[in-house]
Image (cartoon, rainbow, N blue to C red):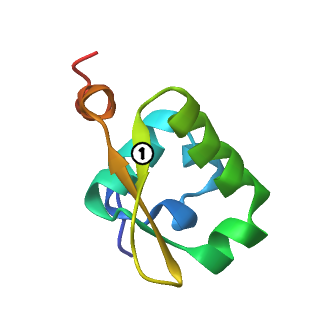
Amino acid sequence: MSIICSSSMPIDRLKPTDRTPVNALRALARKPRVNYFELSESRWLRSLIGDLKRRGWVESAEDVYPWCRYELTTEGISVADGSR
């Protein structure tokens, strides 16, 4: 049996108990791409990313379809690292 750290998984694979803003930031720091289909089909994912954007912790960046890309801001990096 293998254990996978939530911070090494893509954001759309976070377990319900791991769907916190900090875990989401850590997931995006490692894998900033989110599949557009997953984003459009998952209310929790849209809500979580919207929350991160409202807090100023991530910004949308250009990417090719079917990908959405979210980059951490300086503040988001501090939060993900536990510095804030």
Residue at left offset 39%, top offset 74%: 63
- Screen quadrant of the C terminus: top left
Q: Nearer the viewer, residue 74 or 18?
A: 74
Residue type (three-letter) at the residue carrying disc 1:
Glu
- Front residue of 36 and 18: 36
Identified at 42% across, 45% down, the residue is: 59
Q: Is residue 62 left or right of residue 52?
A: left
* Image quadrant where residue 25 sits: top left
The one of 39 and 20 positioned closer to us in this rendering: 39
Q: Is residue 79 left or right of residue 81?
A: right
Q: Which residue is nearer to you in this view: 40 or 12?
A: 40
Mark 1: few/some/many CA within 10 Å (<14, 14-19, 20+): some
Q: In the picture, which quadrant includes the N terminus?
A: bottom left
Q: What secondary structure is found at the residue carrying circle 1?
A: strand
- Residue at (52, 38) in percent of width and height: 53
The quadrant where residue 83 appears: top left
Which residue is under mark 1?
59
User: Residue 71: x, y in percent?
Assistant: 33, 51
